[in-house]
């Protein structure tokens, strides 16, 4: 089982590297870097919104309260650890954290081009709640009751 822990500021560059590697495969299809590649990791870590798996970090999840909901903003796993269940473990941790904090549901969105994510979230109990076109990005929104 992977140890999930709060990210340390010294890990910001490593998390940016994981994000670039995990999301870089979608740049050509989307036509630009997706927002998770542009995350301000130092600010998110300082705000207490980032949890990582393993040491050194092999994956991370960024989540926070958004109104009554618990929102997962970014979830990425290094290519070397993909397929190991680490992403599911991180998402389950984020869900448990939202539940612990008293939120009734978790929300997230992904780009319509990210086919693996579109297939994964429904298998994990998420339901699609809508599609939007924001800032040139085609987003698919999901929610799961906690």
Image (spheres, rainbow, N blue to C red):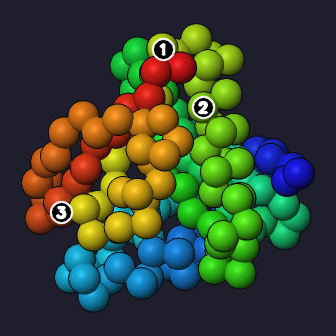
Q: Earlier in the sequence, mark 1 or mark 3?
A: 1
Task: Look at the numbered disc 3 and give the secondary structure of its residue.
Answer: strand
Q: Earlier in the sequence, mark 1 or mark 2?
A: 2
Residue 41, label in figure: none
- Between 22 and 16, the residue placed more toward the observer is 22
Q: Is residue 135 above or below residue 92?
A: below
Q: Report x, y in % for residue 64.
A: 51, 33
Residue 50 is at least partly visible in this image = no
Task: Look at the numbered disc 1 and give the secondary structure of its residue.
Answer: loop
Measured Cα–Cα span from mark 1 to mark 2: 10 Å
Q: Residue at x 27, y 70 (%)?
A: 113
Is 132 placed left or right of 98 in the picture?
left
- Between 37 and 105, the residue placed more toward the observer is 105
Residue 95, label in figure: 2
Q: Earlier in the sequence, mark 2 or mark 3?
A: 2
Q: Report x, y in % for residue 86.
A: 71, 59
Q: Is residue 103 above or below residue 22?
A: above
Q: Is residue 95 above or below residue 24?
A: above
- Tell me the crowding category of disc 2: few under 14, some 14 to 19, or many 20 or more residues within 10 angstroms, Cα based: many
Is 36 placed left or right of 56 in the picture?
left
Is there CB contact under 8 Å for labels 2 and 3?
A: no
Kindly identify which residue carries mark 1: 104
Task: Tell me the mark number nearer the camera, choosing from 1 and 3.
Answer: 1
Q: Report x, y in % for residue 42.
A: 60, 57
Is there CB contact under 8 Å for labels 1 and 2?
A: no
- Tell me the crowding category of disc 1: few under 14, some 14 to 19, or many 20 or more residues within 10 angstroms, Cα based: few
- Between 8 and 27, the residue placed more toward the observer is 27
Kindly identify which residue carries mark 3: 137
Total marks placed: 3
Measured Cα–Cα span from mark 1 to mark 3: 28 Å
Q: Residue at x 57, y 63 (%)?
A: 76
Task: Tell me the mark number nearer the camera, choosing from 2 and 3.
Answer: 2
């Amino acid at each position: 089982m992977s140890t999930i822990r709060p990210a340390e500021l010294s890990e910001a560059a490593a998390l940016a590297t994981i994000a670039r590697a995990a999301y870089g495969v979608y740049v050509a299809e989307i036509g630009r870097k997706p927002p998770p590649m542009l995350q301000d990791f130092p600010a998110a870590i300082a705000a207490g919104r980032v949890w990582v798996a393993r040491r050194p970090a092999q994956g991370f999840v960024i989540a926070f309260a958004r109104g009554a909901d618990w929102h997962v903003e970014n979830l990425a796993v290094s290519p070397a650890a993909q397929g190991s269940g680490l992403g599911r473990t991180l998402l389950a941790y984020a869900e448990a954290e939202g539940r612990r904090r008293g939120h009734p549901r978790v929300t997230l969105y992904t780009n319509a081009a990210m086919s693996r994510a579109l297939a994964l979230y429904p298998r994990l109990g998420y339901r699609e709640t809508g599609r939007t076109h924001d800032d040139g990005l085609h987003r698919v929104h999901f929610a799961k009751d906690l």
